[in-house]
Amino acid sequence: VPEFGFAFDSVNSRIVMTSAPASADQVEIMAFYGQTLAQLGWTGGAGNWVRGAEKLVIGEVQTARGALWRLMLQPR
């Protein structure tokens, strides 16, 4: 959903937010990200991961369009 996303990138840090609908349930989505992010060096779970100086938060949000999954990458 492009209108719900943005990106900011500087020499020192970055902030990226994007949203997307999904037909899978929460358990499947969190299992996918838990496995995939671990392979990429991220640690954590239950929607909150960290790697180096960054954190990634993934969660379901309710909007006027219905439920969307929001992914937010930001400095720790």
Image (tube, helix red, strand yellow):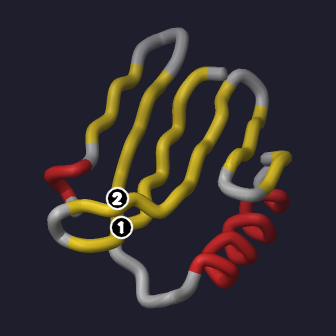
**Residue at left offset 33%, top offset 62%:** 62
Q: Which quadrant: the N terminus?
A: bottom left
Classify 64 as above or below 40.
below
Return the residue nearer the eye: 62 or 33: 62
Point out the tag, 1 or 2, that comes first from the N-terminus: 2
Q: Check disc 2 and give the amino acid type.
A: Ser
What numbered label is drawn on residue 19?
2
Q: Are marks 1 and 2 in contact (CB under 8 Å)?
A: yes
Q: Check disc 1 and give the amino acid type.
A: Leu
SS assignment at label 2: strand
SS assignment at label 1: strand
Residue 25 lies, in percent from the top left, at 56, 85
Which residue sits furthest bottom?
23
- Residue 50, by quadrant, is top right
Which residue sits furthest top?
12
**Residue at left offset 82%, top offset 61%:** 39
What numbered label is drawn on residue 59?
none
Quote the CA–CA distance across marks 1 and 2. Answer: 6 Å
Classify 42 as above or below 68.
above
Residue 47 lies, in percent from the top left, at 66, 54
> Is 17 on the left or on the right of 11, as rendered?
left
Which residue lies under the disc numbered 1? 68
> Badge 1, how many Cα within 10 Å: few under 14, some, many 20+?
many
- Residue 69, by quadrant, is bottom left
**Residue at left offset 66%, top offset 83%:** 28
Q: Which quadrant: the C terminus?
A: top right
Classify 69 as above or below 14.
below
Residue 67 lies, in percent from the top left, at 34, 71
**Residue at left offset 79%, top offset 47%:** 42
> Badge 2, how many Cα within 10 Å: few under 14, some, many 20+?
many
